Amino acid sequence: MAFSIGLLSLSAIAPAAAQDVKNAAKQQIRPKEGPILVNGVAAKVNGEVITLNELMIKVAPMQSVLMARNPRRGPVYEQQLSELKLGILDELIDRTIIFTEFKDRVRAFPDQDIEAEVKRIIQNVYNGDEALFRKYLKATNLTRDQFKEQQRKELLVQIVRAQHFGDVPPPKEAELKAEYAGWALANRDRKKDVGTYKRIYLRKDLGDGPEAQLKLAEDIAKKLAAGEDFAELATKYSNDSKAEDGGLWKDIPRTDLNHEFGFLLFETTGHEMMGPLEDNFGFNIIQVLKRVPGPPEKSFADARELMKRRVESEKKKANFEKWMKKMRARAIIEKMIK
């Protein structure tokens, strides 16, 4: 199963979850990491500082997904989190290298363009939830204006990649349509995503407590992997309102799900079993049966020129990478985290 690159935990992954667990105890197997309030430095590049705040605002949306997928945390979780942080830090370093080279241009971007980019990020990363976006900003001590300044740098990088590094052949129609297919999926109305999935849910306040329920969830996951029937196991073990239906949740809008579960359901591919996944009240084993993505924000005709620029930029990637390699070698880079 593939999923792309938070601080919140999985808390209500299905409609009626509040009703299902309204009397459940709110204990957890592992204490959840709270907001990471940081004011330090993650790296320095040619005298420009990359703060821990900048790093964590980009790490945050995916860290919560890693937490949900790893109820026991442990070395696998720590390794994945470390790789996530370092990968994003490298991206920020490259962005800063470009910024120091072309920063005289950054003020030329109209403020409305920057605000439009922020709104696009809220739509695509935070499912259009402005309140959730504000929570992440608060968790990393970052103001909206500071975030907008980050996006100025991001747009500069995009423009530099699109406008430099040699001429390339004009894109073919098939290339434009292939580019649009991926772009349309990433830039869709996520509020209109709808999915169907099977779920086995074990409440933490039942049985012999959270640790025993997690162990039971792990045992059930092994039974499923060995080929036992999902519906039979859901009927026998699941503690939610769909147990008698074999754990089937049909045509559920993404808006009924929380951020983390929405990500796990709609930003993945395939139909493999997922779990145990931890939320505030219990453990989940999930199998996605169907994903119906929301409509793209633009039609192919309206996005055609954008696709042309994107394909041309991708074709220039080899020259861009050669340039970046030279720039990295010349840059004075100091990483503060390992």
Image: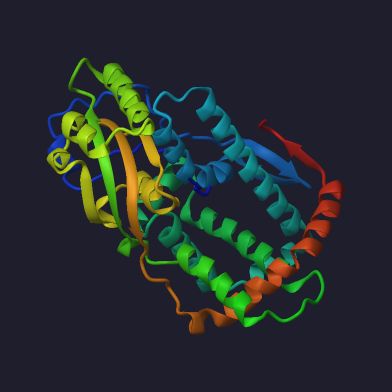
Q: Residue 28's quadrant in the figure?
A: top left
Relative height, residue 129 to residue 72 (above, below)? below
Position in image of residue 197 (x %, y %): 29, 48
- Residue farthest along the bottom direction in this orientation: 301
Residue at (28% x, 17% y) in the render? 212
Relative height, residue 308 to residue 290 (above, below)? below
Q: Residue 164's quadrant in the figure?
A: bottom right
Residue at (73% x, 73% y) in the render? 163
Identify which residue, 47 or 1, lies in the foreground: 1
- Residue farthest along the top direction in this orientation: 208
Residue 276 seen in this snapshot: no
Residue at (57% x, 60% y) in the render? 151
Relative height, residue 3 to residue 101 (above, below)? above
Position in image of residue 243 (x %, y %): 16, 38
Q: Is residue 40 rendered to the left or right of residue 90?
A: left
Identify which residue, 285 or 18, lies in the foreground: 285
